[in-house]
């Protein structure tokens, strides 16, 4: 894995470097071409020998040599790049020279190559020494490694009949639900306990080792219809080891639909007030300490109404310390294990007879651990269905050493890692490291950006690297190694999660193979390339994540590539790290004017400022041809100067949030491949010009734009006067413009539009009727109308044929939801927030109609938020109409 990541990174670096107009001329092209060819040959060897059901010790040793050679070559190249881009004083040049020697000698020592150590010592003091003298030696070393690889191929020829080519990517949709296997009696017992007649507050714990299905069982309980009907309120929070009382309360308050922007006391008071007088169910998942329970227990009132708190934990002492009734989650028995394995490995197909014997052997090796069965079954689902391959999996599992329960689980899970194709291994480990850094859900876009910046993705036929990364995520999801936690409104993956055991496995493997290192406080290392950082850093570090006490100095950290930092310090101090690819400032709360020297960071992919940063970019931003993602709270971009040389930023994927940007033809030509664009226009902010709106007619020049957000103050301009949209759009958010509802005709004609949000828009008096045109909005799945003037809506199922979710927020004038909306077969949700009572009643009637004619009454969910001032009148209308709030999520707002 380390060898694959090193070679992929080296090849990506060479490709990007050779495209640079200046750097490409500073190298010996013949030497670079030789290096590229050797690295490609070795990468092919890694891909071939990695995916044969595990690798031999000889291959592992050879991979270590390959990784070391690739790392050294990359160190030399990037050190030379620093020297080329930065003006060096005599002192700096001597320091750079010493650093070069340091790299060479250090690598030689690591490889235990005494002759090479002597060569470096001999070179010391020779002023004409070039990094490329040593690079030439690296090429010769790669030749020798290639020769060893050829010999190894001859020795292992007998294994070729068992080897299989790398997996082809499968983009089939994964079933995200977990099979209900082995839960029958347990589920019934817990349901009885939770819904029993005991009136006082009762605490119940599900106890068992990691991977036994505690969380899965809790999820089935939480969603069970009996539970939904029995309890007035349900809330869920995931605790994990690094608990924080505020985060726990925020999760609970947010799941109840309340604002969570308060301190601990404020959140606790809000939660207590919401729960008081109601029968509630609280689930605290994965609690590791009694202290975590003590932090929040006072906020759960005992109403005498039969409320329950359900905990899941791996530790019996924690369950007892919380004063709960303990329910032990047992391992699956033989038949349950086999049933679960078949559901995951074959889905709706029967197990082939020739695989049943070895399949049962694999299941027995899992020892009833649900997580192991799910992960291995999911892995085999996407693997060759041959007896030889399955026997290699069984052999790996059987040969795992036995130790404590957790180690046994990790050893079983290691088989799933070991059988990943080489291109997925570094990606999988990287997600595990990110999970270690952040116990919250993992953002998919951030994962993809980091993979691209790390250089661990292999280019494939000119495909966009972000698309390759998304395919890899889907494959890991299909193998049940990651779980999709949340999808965006157009059903794309938005966030994912990883089980703690898999995270532990990733950390163990990553540390062992030198892929990532978790640095405890006070420790100083020298050779790590990727660090989860707490205090000190390595001179050779390529990636520093979770950096809170910043001690990064450009002259010492010349090769730094990834920096994820919690700091308000100046960006200028870091721009000497010209090899940076990913620079993220988290918790950044100030205005900043970026210097023109930003353009020296020649390979910057992502520049991200979190929170309330307001960034003014220099004109040189239009010359940063490798830039892919630029995101901030407010970005002020200069207008390109036609007299200066500008590059086409063909890689730019994301730009948000640009303020008062003049979207001229020049700008559109510079960013032709932009996919996500957020624009804000406001006459009170810097750069406002009354003619800015007129340039928005150029939007249709961005023919690859998929997601567009336009917000701000639009003055007297009307929608159809200033806007044109590219047909590639699938997500559109509009806020703050004047329009007639009939102006939405041009939006409805967009052929790929799946998500539409309109908010805070003004219409002329008398123009408050919307009558969509037949044949439009054919792919729309999500429609949200927020704080708009809409009185009459004439629509039918044919106008929104595949609509899934309809959200109406603060629509005070709408008299009723069109009856035909309820006839849309794909409709899953109608959400109304502070809408007119008559409109809310019409939603209840639609639900009532469906209950009469459809067997499954869960097809359509109704969510209602009513103001307390109108609650009495609303309930009277419900009673008058003979309706019921059963099967409806009802909340009193405020």
Image (cartoon, grey):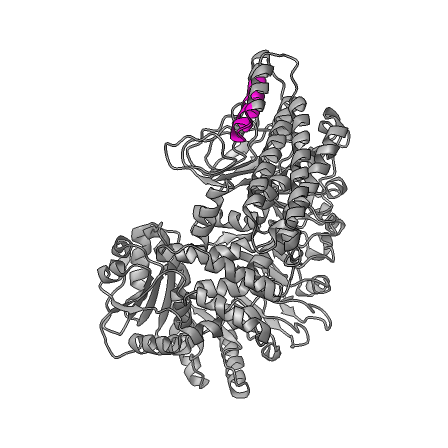
- Exactly how many numbered labels are in the figure? 0
Residue 342, given in percent of the width and then of the height, sits at 52, 72
Q: Is residue 840 magenta?
A: no
Q: Of 103 and 362, which appears nearest the observer?
A: 362
Tell me which corner region of the image, top left, top right, bottom left or bottom right, holds residue 536: top left
Q: Of 249 and 766, which appears nearest the observer?
A: 249
Predominant SS along the magenta part: helix
Q: Residue furthest bottom?
A: 852
At 52% from the left edge and 69% from the top edge, which residue is drawn? 359
Magenta part of the chain: 97-114
| Residue 614 against residue 596 in the figure, above or below | below
| Residue 516 against residue 888 in the figure, above or below | above
Tell me which corner region of the image, top left, top right, bottom left or bottom right, holds residue 187: bottom left
Side (left or right) of 309 relative to 74: left
Q: Is residue 104 magenta?
A: yes
| Residue 195 against residue 324 in the figure, above or below | below
Residue 404, given in percent of the width and then of the height, sits at 35, 55
Mark yes or no: residue 833 visible. Answer: no
Q: Of 236 and 690, which appears nearest the observer?
A: 236
Residue 488, given in percent of the width and then of the height, sits at 56, 60
Q: Of 375 and 596, which appears nearest the observer?
A: 375
Residue 190, given in percent of the width and then of the height, sits at 33, 74
At 52% from the left edge and 82% from the top edge, which residue is drawn? 856
At 67% from the left edge and 56% from the top edge, which residue is drawn? 165
| Residue 68 against residue 340 in the figure, above or below | above
The quadrant in which the C terminus is found is bottom left
Mark yes or no: residue 884 visible. Answer: yes
């Amino acid at each position: 894995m380390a060898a694959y990541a090193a070679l992929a990174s080296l090849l990506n670096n060479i490709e990007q470097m050779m495209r640079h107009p200046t750097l490409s001329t500073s190298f010996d092209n013949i030497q670079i071409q030789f290096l590229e060819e050797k690295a490609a040959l070795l990468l092919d060897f890694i891909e071939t020998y990695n995916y044969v059901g595990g690798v031999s010790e000889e291959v592992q040793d050879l991979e270590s040599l390959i990784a070391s050679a690739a790392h050294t070559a990359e160190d030399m190249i990037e050190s030379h790049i620093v020297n080329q881009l930065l003006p060096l004083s005599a002192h700096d040049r001597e320091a750079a020279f010493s650093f070069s020697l340091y790299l060479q000698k250090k690598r030689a020592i690591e490889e235990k190559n005494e002759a090479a150590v002597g060569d470096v010592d001999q070179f010391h003091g020779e002023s004409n020494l070039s990094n490329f003298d040593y690079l030439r030696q690296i090429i010769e070393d790669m030749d020798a490694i290639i020769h060893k690889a050829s010999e190894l191929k001859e020795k292992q020829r007998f294994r070729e009949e068992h080897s299989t080519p790398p997996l082809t990517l499968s983009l089939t949709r994964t079933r995200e639900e977990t099979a209900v296997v082995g839960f029958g009696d347990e589920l019934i017992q817990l349901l009885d306990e939770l819904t029993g007649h005991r009136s006082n507050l009762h605490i119940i714990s599900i106890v068992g080792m990691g991977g036994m299905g505690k969380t899965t069982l809790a999820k089935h309980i939480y969603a069970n219809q009996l539970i939904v009907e029995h309890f007035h309120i349900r809330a869920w929070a995931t605790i994990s080891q690094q608990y924080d009382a505020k985060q726990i309360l925020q999760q609970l308050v947010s799941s109840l639909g309340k604002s969570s922007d308060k301190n601990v006391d404020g959140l606790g008071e809000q939660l207590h007030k919401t729960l008081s007088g109601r029968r509630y169910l609280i689930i605290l998942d994965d609690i590791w300490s009694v202290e975590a329970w003590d932090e929040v227990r006072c906020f759960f009132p005992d109403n005498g109404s039969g409320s329950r708190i359900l905990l899941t934990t791996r530790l019996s002492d924690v369950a007892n310390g919380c004063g709960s009734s303990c329910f032990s989650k047992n391992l699956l028995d033989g038949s349950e294990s086999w049933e679960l394995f078949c559901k995951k490995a074959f889905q709706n197909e029967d197990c082939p007879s020739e695989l049943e014997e070895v399949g049962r052997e694999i299941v027995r090796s899992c020892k009833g651990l649900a997580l192991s069965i799910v992960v291995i079954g999911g892995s085999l689902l996407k693997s060759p269905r041959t007896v030889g391959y399955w026997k290699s999996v069984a052999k790996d599992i059987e040969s795992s050493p036995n130790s404590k329960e957790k180690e046994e689980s990790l050893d079983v899970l290691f088989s799933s890692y070991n059988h990943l194709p080489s291109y997925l291994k570094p990606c999988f480990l990287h997600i595990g490291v990110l999970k270690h850094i952040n116990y919250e859900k993992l953002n998919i876009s951030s994962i993809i950006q980091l993979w691209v910046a790390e250089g661990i993705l292999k280019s494939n036929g000119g495909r966009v690297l972000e698309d390759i990364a998304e395919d890899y995520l889907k494959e890991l999801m299909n193998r049940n190694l990651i779980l999709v936690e949340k999808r965006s409104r157009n059903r794309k993956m938005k966030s994912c999660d990883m089980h703690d055991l898999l995270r532990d496995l990733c950390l163990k493997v990553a540390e062992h193979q030198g892929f990532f290192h978790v640095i405890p406080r006070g420790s100083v290392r020298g050779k790590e390339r990727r660090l989860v950082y707490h205090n000190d850093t390595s001179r050779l570090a390529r990636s520093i994540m979770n950096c809170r006490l910043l001690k990064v100095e450009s002259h010492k950290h010349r090769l730094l590539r990834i920096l994820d930092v919690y700091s308000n310090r100046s960006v200028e101090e870091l721009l000497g790290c010209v090899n940076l690819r990913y620079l993220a400032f988290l918790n950044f709360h100030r205005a900043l004017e970026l210097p023109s020297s930003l353009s020296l960071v020649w390979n910057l992919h992502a520049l991200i400022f979190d929170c309330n940063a307001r960034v003014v970019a220099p004109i040189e931003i239009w010359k940063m041809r490798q830039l892919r993602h630029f995101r901030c709270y407010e970005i002020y971009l200069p207008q390109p100067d036609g007299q200066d040389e500008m590059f086409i930023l063909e890689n730019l994927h994301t730009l948000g949030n640009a303020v008062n940007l003049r979207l001229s033809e020049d700008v559109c030509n510079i960013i032709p491949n932009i996919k996500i664009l957020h624009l804000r226009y406001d006459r009170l902010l810097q750069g406002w010009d009354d003619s800015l709106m007129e340039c928005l007619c150029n939007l249709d020049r961005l023919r690859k734009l998929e997601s567009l957000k336009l917000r701000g103050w639009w003055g007297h301009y009307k929608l159809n006067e200033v806007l044109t949209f590219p047909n590639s759009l699938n997500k559109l958010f509009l806020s703050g413009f004047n329009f007639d509802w009939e102006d939405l005709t041009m939006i409805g004609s967009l052929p790929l539009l799946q998500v539409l949000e309109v908010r805070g828009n003004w219409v002329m008096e008398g123009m408050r009727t919307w009558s969509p045109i037949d044949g439009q909005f054919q792919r729309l799945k999500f429609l949200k109308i927020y704080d708009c003037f809409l009185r009459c809506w004439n629509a039918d199922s044919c106008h929104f044929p595949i609509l899934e979710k309809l959200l109406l927020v603060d629509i005070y004038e709408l008299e009723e939801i069109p009856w035909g909306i309820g006839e849309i077969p794909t409709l899953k949700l109608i959400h109304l927030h502070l809408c007119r009572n008559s409109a809310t009643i019409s939603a209840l009637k639609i639900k009532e109609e469906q209950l009469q004619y459809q067997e499954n009454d869960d097809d359509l969910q109704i969510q209602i938020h009513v103001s307390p001032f109108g609650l009495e009148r609303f309930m009277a209308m419900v009673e008058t109409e003979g309706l019921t709030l059963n099967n409806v999520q009802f909340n009193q707002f405020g």
